[in-house]
Image (cartoon, rainbow, N blue to C red):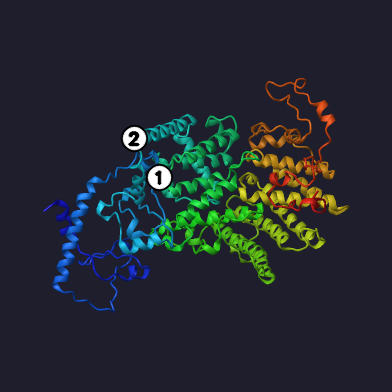
């Protein structure tokens, strides 16, 4: 008897009746006749109980049993003969797969496609919830069960493609992979810093970034990092966002001349690793994309925060993170991690969709994952205890984002209802009343651990009130006084929150997350509008608040590139209003107190003026002189281009302006031809 037949003879037989868990989920049950629990119940850590069959036992004739046995033996012999002819060798895996990272995907087919080898991390192929292929596999069984199940389905499927290629094609593909690896090495994507320096960056991440992006298991992350087994993609993404918040002294010790250079270097390395498909773990890719959305270094860059949000959302939904049943096979800690990742994606996606005026990547009507709870923010091995303000932020921000999403859905639904719109708006407006006590108590002095996170949430909520009210109000486009008064009150409330943060000795303005910036710029733009419309004491208050908002915006410039051009744009708007605010570049002597200088972001103060001027000055570029490149004669012979009140060319018909593309935060200027009735 061959070895395969001996193995088949000794293999325990499967029961003819499924257990209760598998029967309820309509999946194949592998419970053995000896009473051993099936693989599904073992993974779910539940008791494997057989159902009571109501059909009874079917008594087969002895001849029928003999026919089935002969057919089974013939099938096994056939599979044994064919197995050696199938080349199941796998191409060389990337170093990231050898770092011990746990790979996860949707467990929609746990009994069929999950890899039981612990070294491969229980990865799963997600084939969709209503796939005809899934139904066929459910009825037929695992097509690779006779191959030892030592590899994932994806390996077998990929091998079927690679087997059709010629040796020359294989050699060319190998050369391309080698060239990609060489490019990544030249870029420094695999460079290692001193362990002490990287630990400081990780500490900054968990102190200042993690409360807004709780997308890691702290224990697992720390263990991987300390053992130098963290994915290069993840490590560079973490270092990039940590460089935004860390001290200037740490930037110098890392070997960078400026914060901008440090952030950009780590960002470019992570982006190159992403584009070269170096990382194979889908969860790691999602986590990295979420972090990379924080760095937006050029106003016309296509791979901005919206791009990275879309990439992460598409991969997450491809894994089935939007379906609750995809979480059933995961351990308790992994279920929490998945929910945190999913809801962090959702909250930032709906946030940017609202302030950009774009359709969200994630639609809640197709998702049934439970909303983030306090329990999800607790470690699995910890008992029930109170979660501090930082842990509560993600939970409350999630609830706020759900209310915002409801407002957007009611506004842009195919059959809008005024009653449902009003209900959604009132729920959003009354959100502060539903906050826990820790987020509603009065704080005399705001500190990082006491009052900071409620203040950030209040900023975001006030911004949403302005955006949604303008979106839902029929009088918003016309600039009705009632609507403007409401905006003015919300903008003033934003200033008061910022005053509390600025008055704190903890330099809390520099700790603000990306999602809080629209509130700052929204407040400034509202007060600019009042500067153009009002007179007397109201104008004085508006100018005072606008000045204060620019002070806050000025502190953000040293860390966030997009804050530089947004600050410059707002400064131009204030000049148009006749405000006496100092121009960008005339920074006060306190600028050095924030640890950086204006030279960290080498943006010339006349950059926008040069780009929008009818006679571009090439004197600042190598190889050009003003005399050689003079076009004054040509400029005089052409008609003067039409420009808006900020000096931007509007096109022949006067309707186009790049302002909306450079200032997308609150869509106050999307009213096209009637901008003078609204803002300018």
Q: Residue at x 30, y 68 (%)?
A: 47
In terms of image quadrants, where is residue 94?
A: top left
| 571 with respect to 8 (left or right) | right
Q: Residues within 10 Å of mark 1 (few under 14, many from 20)?
A: few
Answer above or below: position of 473 versus 202.
Answer: below
Rendered location of residue 421, percent (x, y): 67, 67
Helix or strand or loop: what does disc 2 sit on? helix
Mark 1 / mark 2, whichever is N-terminal: 2
Residue at 32% across / 71% down in the picture? 20
Determine whether the residue tagged by mark 1 lies in a helix, strand or loop: helix
- Within 10 Å of disc 2 (Cα), the crowding (few <14, some 14-19, many 20+) is few
Left or right of 4 on screen, residue 496? right
Q: Nearer the viewer, residue 480 or 429?
A: 480
Give the numbered dot on residue 167: 2
Q: Which residue is mark 1?
A: 223
Residue depicted at x 45% and y 31%: 185
- Nearer the observer, 421 or 204: 421
The image shows residue 515 at horizontal and vertical percentages of 62, 51
The residue at the point 54 percent across, 59 percent down is 395
Question: Residue 30 got which mark?
Answer: none
Can residue 24 be seen in this snapshot?
yes
């Amino acid at each position: 008897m061959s070895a395969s037949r001996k193995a088949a003879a000794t293999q325990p037989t499967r029961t003819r009746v499924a257990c209760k868990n598998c029967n309820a989920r309509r999946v194949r049950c592998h419970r053995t006749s000896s009473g051993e629990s099936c693989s599904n119940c073992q993974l779910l850590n539940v008791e494997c109980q057989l159902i009571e069959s109501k059909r009874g036992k079917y008594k087969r004739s002895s001849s029928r049993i003999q026919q089935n046995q002969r057919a089974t033996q013939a099938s096994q012999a056939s599979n044994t003969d064919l197995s050696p002819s199938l080349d199941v060798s796998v191409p060389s895996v990337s170093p990231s797969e050898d770092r011990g990272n746990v790979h996860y995907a949707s467990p929609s087919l746990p009994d069929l496609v999950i890899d039981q080898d612990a070294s491969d991390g229980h990865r799963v192929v997600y084939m969709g919830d209503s796939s005809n292929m899934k139904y066929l596999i459910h009825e037929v069984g695992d097509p690779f069960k006779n191959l030892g199940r030592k590899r994932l389905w994806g390996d077998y499927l990929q091998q079927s493609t690679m087997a059709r290629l010629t040796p020359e094609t294989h050699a060319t593909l190998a050369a391309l992979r080698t060239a990609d690896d060489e490019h990544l090495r030249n870029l420094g994507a695999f460079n290692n810093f001193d362990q002490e320096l990287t630990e400081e960056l990780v500490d900054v991440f968990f102190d200042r970034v993690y409360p807004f992006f709780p997308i890691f298991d702290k224990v697992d992350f720390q263990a991987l990092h300390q053992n130098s087994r963290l994915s290069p993609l993840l490590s560079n993404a973490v270092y990039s966002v940590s460089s935004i918040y860390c001290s200037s002294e740490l930037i110098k010790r890392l070997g960078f001349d400026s914060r901008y250079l440090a952030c950009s270097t780590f960002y470019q390395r992570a982006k190159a690793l992403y584009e070269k498909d170096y990382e194979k773990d889908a969860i790691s890719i999602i986590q990295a994309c979420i972090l990379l959305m924080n760095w937006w270094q050029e106003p016309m860059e296509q791979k901005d925060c919206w791009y990275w949000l879309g990439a992460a959302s598409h991969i997450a939904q491809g894994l089935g993170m939007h379906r609750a049943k995809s979480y059933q096979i995961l351990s308790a800690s992994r279920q929490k991690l998945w929910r945190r990742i999913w809801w962090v994606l959702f909250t930032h996606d709906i946030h940017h969709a609202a302030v950009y005026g774009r359709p969200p990547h994630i639609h809640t009507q197709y998702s049934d994952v439970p909303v983030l709870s306090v329990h999800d923010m607790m470690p699995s091995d910890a008992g029930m205890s109170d979660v501090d303000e930082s842990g509560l932020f993600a939970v409350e921000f999630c609830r706020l984002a759900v209310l915002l999403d409801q407002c957007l859905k009611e506004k842009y639904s195919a059959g809008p209802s005024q009653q449902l719109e009003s209900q959604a708006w009132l729920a959003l407006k009354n959100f502060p009343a539903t906050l826990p006590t820790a987020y509603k108590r009065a704080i005399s002095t705001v500190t990082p651990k006491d009052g900071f996170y409620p203040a950030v949430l209040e900023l975001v909520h006030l911004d949403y009130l302005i955006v949604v009210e303008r979106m839902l109000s029929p009088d918003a486009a016309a600039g009705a006084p009632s609507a403007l008064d409401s905006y003015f009150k919300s903008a003033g409330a934003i200033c008061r929150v910022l005053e509390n943060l600025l008055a704190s000795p903890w330099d809390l303005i520099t700790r603000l997350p990306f999602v809080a910036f629209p509130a700052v710029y929204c407040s400034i733009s509202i007060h600019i509008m009042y500067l153009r419309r009002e007179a007397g004491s109201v104008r004085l208050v508006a100018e005072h608040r606008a000045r204060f908002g620019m002070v806050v915006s000025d502190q953000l410039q040293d860390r966030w590139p997009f804050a530089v051009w947004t600050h410059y744009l707002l400064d131009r708007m204030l000049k148009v209003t006749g405000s006496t605010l100092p121009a960008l570049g005339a920074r006060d002597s306190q600028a050095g107190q924030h640890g950086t200088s204006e030279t960290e972001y080498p943006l010339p103060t006349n950059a926008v003026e040069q780009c929008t001027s009818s006679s571009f000055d090439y004197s600042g570029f190598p190889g050009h002189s003003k005399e050689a490149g003079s076009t004054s004669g040509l400029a005089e012979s052409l008609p003067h281009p039409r420009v808006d009140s900020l000096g931007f060319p509007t096109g022949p018909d006067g309707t186009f302006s790049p302002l909306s593309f450079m200032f997308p935060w609150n869509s106050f200027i999307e009213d096209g031809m009637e901008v003078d009735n609204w803002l300018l």
